[in-house]
Structure formats: C-alpha cells, structure tokens
C-alpha cells in the first residue's frame, strides 16, 4: 500500500468535514455533468479549492492541477467548470451553515437580507469594488449578486440594485434608510424592515409635520422598553408611504459601548457629536412597512436581528477567506467564486472548532 504524503493526508482529513452527501450533491446539481475527462468528483472539488481557496489565477491553477495529476485542463475549461459548479458550492455552504444553525429551517417567516461591502483586489494597485449581495433567510442562499465600482453615481448602497417582488420582506441596514429606497420597495409591492437613520430620512406624523422623535423617545426610560409609532415617509412628487417606527431602549452596558464607539469615531474624524446623536445611541430604532397585524413591534425588532447573518457572511469572506482574484465580467462565475470562498471559510471554522473541542492526534 502506497503511503500518503502530507498533502494527501491533509486532504483526506478535510474531506471528513464536508457534508456526508457532498458527492451526491455534485451529481444532483449537475456540477460534473458533461465533463469529457477527469470526472472524479474529489479531484474536481480539489481543483476548485486550489483556485478559490489559495487565490490562484485560473492559469496557475490549471498548471498546478496538471503537475499534481488532478486534471488536464486549460484556464478556459476551469472557468467553465467553476460556472457549472455554482449550485454545488452553494449546496455545500448551505449544508455547513445548517449544521451551525439547525433551527434556521424551522422559522416559517422568510426574509431577504440585503447589504453591500467593499472589496479590493490584491496588490498595491488593486481596484476597489462593491459587492451588492442578497441572502435568503432561512434558506441561507444567495439569490442576487452584483459587482460595481466602489465609486460613481448609482454604485452606492441602494435597494434599486435588487429586483424586488411583490410580497417580499426585505431586511436592510441604515445605509438603505432613504425615502427613495422605501418608495422603490413600495412600488414593487415589497415590505421593508431597516435600521432607522435619523439623519438620512425625514419622517412625518399623520398631519404632515416632522415627527417629534426625541419627544417620543423620552417615553422609554427603562432598558428593554419598546414602542411603535405610525409615521409617514414623504417623497417629492409621490404619496407618502405609511410605516412604523419601532424602538427599544438598550441596557446601560449596551449604551456605554455605543457611546464609546461614537466618541472614538468622532475623535478619529475630528468631528463634534451633536447632543441628539448621543441620545439616539441609547436606542435601537427600526423602520418597518411590515403589516402590524402580522408583526408586532417586538416581533419586528426581533426579526431585524436576522440581518446579522449577512454581516457574518461578509466577515467570513474578508477574514477567513481572502478574496483573491475577483472575477468581474461574469455573474455566474462570480457567484460560484463567492460560494467557493464561503465554503473555505466554513470549513476553516469547522476545523478550528473541532481542534478546540477534541484532543488532537494529528
């Protein structure tokens, strides 16, 4: 029996951390359908991970795969394999995520989590890009991916980057809390739940007057108290959109952390904090167009916490799986590449958790 070298031993160890049905998923999703040669599912995955996990270019990956005896293919053929493997990589990520959060699929309420993040290509002259990303909850699957320049008109955070559908529930951060975004969602029949940004949007009462935010916040004096108020979101040339402002007061510890962060950032940017900004830091405020009879104030606030999943996703992309050579010109390959990066991050987390929890023997 031929002894395994170190690289082969490590690869066999890694395979033990994949979902049990990883080979079946490859066939079900069509990842290896139509391959004329090198039909080994194991080698196919290994070559893909050389590209997305090690940050190698397509050309260098193809060369190394040939030297290692894994596959004989060109950079163009590898590019096609990556595109074809998008659903397979997504399924592997979904299975690993569900291992971490077994309760995710038991939640009957579906949401669409949207956000964007800036990424930079490697090297001193690497360009900056913005990834606009949409994640389905509880499926934890990407349903929209868009890559734009980090600067320029129309390239910032906006719900307009996403094709919204009637009845969808969209969760978004304060960067999307603008009248234009809320009206865009309303025009598509979608409902939104987003972090309220007092400085970025005007809300009014039923009489068309500016909503007295500080006055209403004063009614919440104890940690954990929550209330909701009906407000209107105006936009020039359109009828105002009705919404609810849902607010909960933070604990003293949470308030202290928020104020510390605000002061630190203000000192760094040499800004003077406004008194009302310090008051706003004492509360979590979300703006919602979800039906009040389906989502109480407390439920709306709780549901907003799901949005943290997309923050964790971006953290995995950036900290655990360096983004490497970003494919910019093809949406399918870009999505497959991102799923590959997420798979690397999830496997790394699972390996580390196993190493911390059990006595190692190798």
Image (spheres, helix red, strand yellow):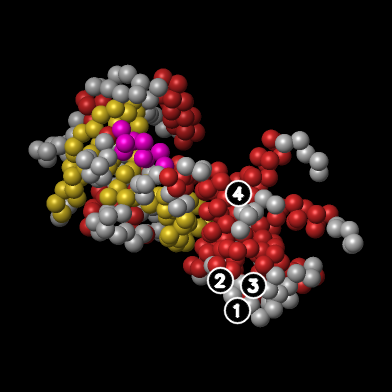
Residue at figure coordinates x 66%, y 39% from the top left: 353
| Pointers 1 and 3 in contact (C-beta within 8 Å) | no
| Pointers 4 and 3 in contact (C-beta within 8 Å) | no
Instruction: Give residue 328's position: percent from left, percent from top.
Output: 53, 66
Inter-mark Cα distance, 4 to 1: 29 Å
Q: Residue furthest bottom?
A: 36
Label 4 packing within 10 angstroms: few (<14), some (14-19), many (20+): many
Q: Is residue 306 visible from the viewing direction of this image?
A: yes
Q: Quadrant of residue 289?
A: top left
Inter-mark Cα distance, 4 to 2: 23 Å
Q: Which mark sits nearer the N-terminus, 4 or 2? A: 2
In what element is the residue under mark 1? loop
Residue at figure coordinates x 32%, y 18% from the top left: 222
Residue at figure coordinates x 68%, y 73% from the top left: 39
Instruction: Give residue 124's position: percent from left, percent from top.
Output: 63, 56
| Pointers 2 and 1 in contact (C-beta within 8 Å) | yes
Q: Which mark sits nearer the N-terminus, 3 or 2? A: 2
Inter-mark Cα distance, 2 to 1: 8 Å
Residue 342 falls inside the magenta stretch: no
Question: In the picture provided, is 140 more to the left or to the right than 85?
Answer: left
Label 2 packing within 10 angstroms: few (<14), some (14-19), many (20+): some
Residue at figure coordinates x 49%, y 67% from the top left: 331
Residue to which mark 3 is pinned: 78
Instruction: Give residue 130's position: percent from left, percent from top.
Output: 47, 56
Q: What stretch of residues is rendered in magenta?
A: 298-306
Q: Residue furthest left?
A: 207
Q: Which mark sits nearer the N-terminus, 4 or 3? A: 3
Does 237 appear above or below 36? Answer: above
Instruction: Give residue 48's position: percent from left, percent from top.
Output: 65, 64
Q: Quadrant of the N terminus?
A: bottom right
Label 1 packing within 10 angstroms: few (<14), some (14-19), many (20+): few
């Amino acid at each position: 029996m031929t002894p395994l070298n170190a690289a082969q031993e490590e690869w066999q160890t890694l395979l033990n951390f994949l979902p049990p049905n990883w080979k079946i998923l490859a066939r079900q999703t069509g990842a290896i359908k139509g391959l004329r040669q090198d039909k080994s599912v194991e080698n196919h995955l290994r070559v893909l991970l050389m590209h997305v996990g090690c940050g190698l270019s397509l050309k260098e990956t193809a060369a190394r795969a040939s030297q290692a005896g894994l596959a004989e293919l060109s950079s163009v053929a590898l590019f096609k394999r990556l595109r074809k493997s998008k659903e397979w990589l997504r399924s592997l990520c979904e299975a690993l995520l569900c291992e971490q959060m077994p309760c995710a699929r038991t939640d009957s309420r579906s949401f669409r989590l949207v956000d964007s993040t800036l990424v930079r290509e490697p090297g001193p002259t690497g360009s900056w890009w913005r990834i606009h990303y949409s994640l389905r909850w509880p499926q934890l699957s990407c349903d929209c991916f868009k890559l734009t320049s980090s600067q320029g008109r129309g390239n910032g955070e906006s719900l307009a980057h996403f094709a919204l559908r009637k009845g969808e529930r969209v969760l978004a951060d304060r960067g999307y809390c603008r009248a234009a975004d809320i009206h865009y969602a309303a025009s598509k029949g979608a409902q939104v739940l987003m972090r309220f940004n007092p400085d970025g949007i005007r809300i009014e009462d039923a009489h068309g007057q500016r909503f007295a935010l500080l006055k209403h916040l004063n009614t919440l004096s104890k940690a954990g108290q929550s209330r909701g108020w009906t407000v209107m979101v105006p936009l020039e040339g359109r009828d105002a959109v009705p919404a609810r402002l849902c607010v909960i007061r933070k604990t003293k510890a949470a308030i202290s952390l928020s104020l510390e962060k605000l002061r630190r950032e203000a000192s760094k940017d040499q800004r003077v904090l406004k008194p009302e900004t310090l008051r706003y830091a004492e509360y979590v405020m979300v703006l919602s167009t979800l039906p009040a009879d389906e989502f109480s104030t407390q439920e709306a606030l709780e549901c907003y916490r799901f949005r943290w999943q997309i923050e964790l996703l971006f953290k995995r992309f950036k900290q655990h799986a360096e983004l490497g050579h970003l494919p910019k010109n093809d949406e399918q390959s870009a999505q497959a590449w991102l799923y590959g990066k997420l798979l690397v991050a999830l496997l790394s987390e699972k390996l580390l958790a196993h190493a911390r929890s059990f006595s190692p023997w190798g």
